[in-house]
Image: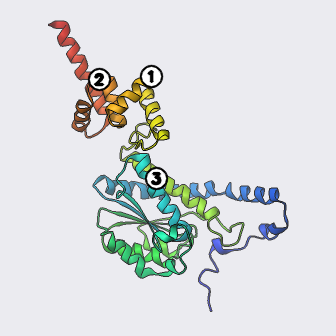
């Protein structure tokens, strides 16, 4: 029998790690740390491909499309994790960025054997989500061979969606199925074939780039601040308060009061403080400028200056 995985770099055994079961804890930890340190360089070689994919994804999302990650095993869990962090970080609707894992929700916490081999289930997942031409589907698979992921990408392509493939081997079937292939070749793992290690780290770094830079492109940050943050707990309330204080120069007490008036909308709170207007008026000002804070801040300042001039000449 021919093993289709035997030639994959992620499946090779590295002789440097052949006796880790005989080393001290610190020796193994140092070996793992040194191996992990090679991952960013591998990601760096793929930056042009990552950037091209992000621009294409952002273009479709700007027109109302969604970003849908599809993966199996560790890759699927990382994909779902990245998607689930977008609403609290960027204030997105949960439908805007979604993660799909082979085997469904049970696979998030335990292995669902055979799920990644079911290409028909991958097709069904894309069908169920009613993927269309404005959507982007990003398949994530360390081997680049998971049938569930390849089946999903094939159906997404058939429906006119943008397709992106992220793998950790060269010349993979997933790359062949994607309009935007991204290959981050990290080589053999410390524990042979355990792609939750270097390959998992590489995938996490790329997923971070894709979601974060896409949201920056969509205007869901202000400078490097999480201007759309959803203040759903005390930590995030504190972050929003510091953000408003930093942007306006107001003290923390005034910043929190403005946020409470603005129902914890950072943009509205900034305008409330800077222009001395109520929350409803601040919302109207934002809406008039397409929810772009910088434009609303500038226009509000101009309106206030004109009002001052009118008073001066009255």
Q: Of circles 1 and 2, which is in front? A: 1
Secondary structure beneath disc 2?
Answer: helix
The percent position of residue 94, horizontal first and vertical second, equals 37, 56
Q: Specify the farthest residue to the bottom.
A: 1
Secondary structure beneath disc 3?
Answer: loop
Q: Residue at x 30, y 72 (%)?
A: 159
The percent position of residue 95, horizontal first and vertical second, equals 34, 58
Mark nearer the N terminus (3 vs 2): 3
Q: Quadrant of residue 142?
A: bottom right
Q: Specify the farthest residue to the top.
A: 313
- Residue of label 1: 251
Secondary structure beneath disc 1?
Answer: loop
Mark nearer the N terminus (1 vs 2): 1
Above or below for 248 versus 61: above
**Mark 1 and mark 2: span between their CA atoms?**
16 Å
State yes or no: discs 1 and 3 in contact (Cβ < 8 Å). no
179 or 65: nearer the eye? 65
- Residue of label 2: 275
Above or below for 313 versus 10: above
- Residue of label 3: 85
**Mark 3 and mark 2: span between their CA atoms?**
32 Å
> Is residue 274 visible in the rendered structure shown here?
yes
Q: Residue at x 38, y 47 (%)?
A: 91
The percent position of residue 265, horizontal first and vertical second, equals 35, 37
Mark nearer the N terminus (1 vs 3): 3
């Amino acid at each position: 029998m021919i093993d289709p995985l035997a030639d994959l770099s992620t499946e090779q055994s590295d002789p440097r790690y052949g006796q880790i079961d005989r080393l001290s804890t610190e020796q193994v930890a140092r070996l793992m740390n040194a191996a992990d340190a090679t991952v960013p360089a591998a990601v760096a070689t793929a930056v042009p491909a990552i950037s091209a994919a992000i621009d294409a994804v952002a273009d479709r999302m700007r027109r109302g499309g969604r970003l849908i990650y599809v993966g199996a095993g560790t890759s699927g869990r990382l994909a779902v994790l990245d998607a689930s962090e977008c609403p609290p970080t960027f204030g997105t609707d949960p439908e805007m960025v979604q993660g799909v894992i082979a085997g469904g929700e049970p696979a998030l916490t335990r292995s669902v054997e055979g799920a990644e081999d079911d290409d028909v289930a991958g097709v069904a997942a894309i069908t169920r989500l009613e993927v269309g031409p404005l959507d982007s589907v990003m398949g994530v698979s360390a081997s680049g061979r998971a049938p569930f992921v390849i089946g999903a990408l094939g159906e997404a392509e058939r429906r006119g969606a943008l397709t992106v493939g992220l793998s950790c081997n060269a010349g993979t079937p997933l790359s062949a199925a994607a309009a935007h292939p991204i290959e981050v070749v990290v080589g053999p793992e410390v524990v042979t074939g355990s792609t939750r290690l270097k390959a998992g780290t590489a995938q996490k770094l790329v997923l971070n780039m894709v979601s974060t830079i896409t949201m920056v492109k969509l205007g869901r940050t202000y400078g490097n601040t999480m201007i759309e943050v959803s203040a759903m707990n005390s930590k995030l309330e504190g972050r929003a308060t510091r953000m408003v204080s930093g942007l306006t120069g107001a003290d923390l007490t005034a910043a929190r009061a403005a946020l409470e008036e603005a129902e914890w909308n950072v943009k509205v709170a900034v305008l409330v403080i800077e222009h001395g207007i109520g929350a409803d008026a601040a919302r109207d000002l934002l809406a008039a400028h397409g929810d772009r804070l910088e434009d609303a801040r500038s226009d509000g300042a101009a309106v206030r200056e004109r009002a001052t001039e009118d008073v001066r000449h009255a």
